[in-house]
Every structure is written in structure tokens, then in C-alpha cells.
Amino acid sequence: MDVKTRSNSFSHTQYPCNEHYFDTINSYNKAYLLGFICADGWTTERNEIGICVKKDDQDIITFFKKELESDKPVYYKNDGEAVEIRIQNQNLYNKLKEYSIIPNKSLCLNIEKVISLVNLDSKYLPAFLLGYFDGDGGIYEYAPPDKVP
């Protein structure tokens, strides 16, 4: 008997999406989202891609869903203070993995390597860096200890 098994990713495709979205980073929106995921997103070995932001920043989740053509519902966490989306898709996961965006990437991700692996056109670099900055950036004024009032 010839029995074909479905992958975990395929069996969870209740909410389809554009699974080839990150195959080629050829737009400002794709570059921005890739940068954002590098900074503040995650992947899991269950072929998931996720983003969680505070409620005030939920527009990024809406943008992410629109770009990936997904109607996956969002989850509210911490008494509605945070908004999260997880999309489970093997193709998306594998493509991000090719770009070195792997589970537990926080301590080992090198964005210069990601930019190289993506073969990012220089015209999209500002969008990628803006996404990275929006995900994890901040500007602080630093005063050396001997200059603190």
C-alpha cells in the first residue's frame, strides 16, 4: 500500500499564505520585513515564523499579514498588551534558514551575512536597515561616567 504522509507544515495550512514571499528580495516591503524579522522576529523548527509586538505597534502585524497574503488570526497576549502572529509554512521557514535566520538567532545572527546571502540590491538596503532598526533599534544619548551631572 502506497501511503503518503503530509508534512507538519502542510497539515497546518488552514490559513494559506504566499509561501514564496521571501524567495527573492526585490521590493522595499520585502527588504523591510526581512530586516524586521532579523531583529525582532523568530523561527522555530516547527517551520514557524513569528512576530510579537506591543499593541501600540500592531500595524506591523497588519502589514506582515497583508504582504504575505495571509488571513491568519493574531493572538493577543499579556492581557491584550501584546499582539502576536505565527505563520507555519515549510517553504518560508526554509528560505529564511537559507538566509541564516534560524531558531535562537539572537546571539549568532550576522546581518552582513544575511545581506550577502540574500544578494540584496543596494537600493533596498535602506529599507532592510529601517526594518532592522524598527524591530530592535533605539537612539540613546550616552554620557561617559565622568560627564554625568
Image: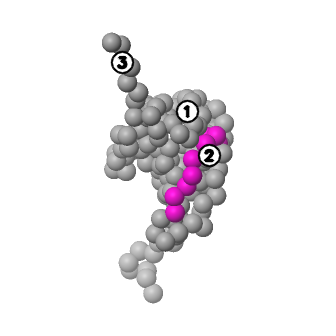
Alpha-carbon neighbours of circle 1 within 10 Å: few (<14), some, or many (≥20)? some
Amino acid type at mark 2 = Asp
Q: Secondary structure at mark 2?
A: loop
- Residue 121 position in % (x across, y down): 61, 32
Residue of label 2: 71
Residue of label 1: 19
| Magenta residues, start to end | 67-76
Q: Secondary structure at mark 1?
A: loop
| Magenta span includes 71 | yes
Q: Residue at x 41, y 38 (%)?
A: 47
Query: From the viewer's perspective, is residue 94 above or below residue 128?
Result: above
Q: Secondary structure at mark 3?
A: loop
Residue of label 3: 3
Total marks in image: 3
- 3 or 1: mark nearer the eye: 3
Q: Which mark is residue 132?
A: none
**Which quarter shows the C terminus?**
bottom left
Q: Earlier in the sequence, mark 3 or mark 2?
A: 3
Residue in the foreground of this view, choosing between 57 and 121? 57
| Magenta span includes 19 | no
Amino acid type at mark 3 = Val
